[in-house]
Amino acid sequence: MSLSEEQAAPLSAETVVVAAGRPPRTRDQPVNPPLVLSSTYFGTGPLGDGDRGYGRYSNPTWDPFEEALGQLEGAELPGLLYASGLAAVSSALSLVPAGGVLVMPSHSYAGSLVMATELAEKGFLELRTVDITDTDAVLEQLTPAEGAAASMLWLESPTNPMLGVADIRALTAAAHAAGAIVVTDNTFSTPLVQQPLSLGSDVVLHSVTKYLSGHSDVVLGALVTSDAGLRATLLHHRTIHGGIAGPFEAWLALRGLRTLALRIERSQASAVVLAERLSTHPRVASVRFPGLASDPGHERAKAQMKGFGSILCIEVAPVGGAQGLSGADAADRIVRALQLWLPATSLGGVESLIERRRRHVAEPVTVPENLVRLSVGIENVEDLWADLEQALGSLDG
């Protein structure tokens, strides 16, 4: 089902999302891969390489998505699809040896942080959290003056929700020099905006729930690597721990993937417009978005990303006078006043979503109470701005 090497070499990522993972071009084959609903497969004798055997081992509906994602990330092997983003996180963290050291951004996705913290509390690993934008601080944690060197460096860039940008190339080189493997969560950027494998990462992680599927109707995760040994280990973990994708969800994810390039193009362009306008609004204390020249991660993002993504965050200014609203209360009022933006968690869908992140108890306390995350969708940007403007204006009433 994969593109031939002769075809794949000259094709852009925008074409690969449409062309990859198609059935063979033989007479009367369907244009799209079929949905296969089966818990087991016919066979006799010992299972060999390539035999599906059982529904927990393999499903023909997973294959096209895994092949397409591997090609998009520039991997030499197909990706691995999981039941959720956190199932993929669990599988990736299983690569840390017993008692090994995990270095992770202090502002990682909350689910990843919670899982790593729980593993550390149970003594399975040592967790060191660090400001991933501070390269020198990360280097110190990889090879400290006292204590063991790191076994794994976990990267997320831009980070969720603080939008910090890591120097992926420099950090992966340092991690490898220390003997550590590198896992990079590429959910925010997608392979159309950033390809961590080309920057030195060993494993790339996605919450497929977000941009890759793109329609807020499935929960899935994925891992991608070019290392056959790592892939075999991850596949074994998926098989034994049972974090497998449902075939219908996999089929929906591939259908959603086909429009990824168009969705990213539209949402990225709108995010730039909204970030620039919000940065001058009196009710907004600050804007976090690497596409702004004033953002501390701007130059680094330019060097390793193709665009700046479609997520931005604002910190809402407190309201003085008779209302006397704190920044957090003002943020909540803005979210409630919106009519087009949807107040909901998650991101990367066709619809624009918004939420105050500290409403989640698992969010690190270093995330400001007044921080609001905006996932820009594909609606008309002027309609999105008009809704934000009227909601911000509600603080004046």
Image (cartoon, rainbow, N blue to C red):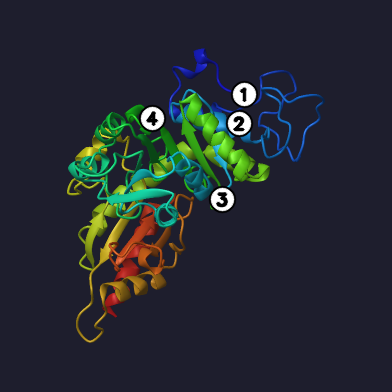
Residue 41 x/y as whole percent: 78, 33
Of the image marks 2 and 4, the number of the one nearer the N terminus = 2
| For discs 2 and 4, the disc positioned in front in the rendered view | 4
Of the image marks 3 and 1, the number of the one nearer the N terminus = 1
Give, as a three-letter code, the residue at label 2: Pro
Residue for point 36% across, 66% down: 358
Looking at this view, is 7 or 169 the one in front? 169
Of the image marks 4 and 3, the number of the one nearer the N terminus = 4
Label 1: which residue? 1
SS label for mark 4: helix
Q: CA distance from mark 4 to mark 3?
A: 24 Å
Label 2 crowd (10 A; few <14 / some 14-19 / many >=20): many
Labels 1 and 4 touching (C-beta < 8 A): no
Q: Residue lying farthest bottom?
A: 322
Residue 297 x/y as whole percent: 22, 45
Would you identify the image quadrant in which residue 238 lies?
Answer: top right
Looking at this view, is 390 or 322 the one in front? 322
Labels 2 and 3 touching (C-beta < 8 A): no
Give, as a three-letter code, the residue at label 3: Val
Q: CA distance from mark 1 to mark 2?
A: 7 Å
Label 2: which residue? 64
Q: CA distance from mark 3 to mark 1?
A: 24 Å
Q: What number is the disc on residue 197?
A: 4
Labels 1 and 2 touching (C-beta < 8 A): yes
| For discs 1 and 4, the disc positioned in front in the rendered view | 4
Q: Is residue 251 above or below residue 334?
A: above
Label 3 crowd (10 A; few <14 / some 14-19 / many >=20): many
Residue for point 30% across, 74% down: 330
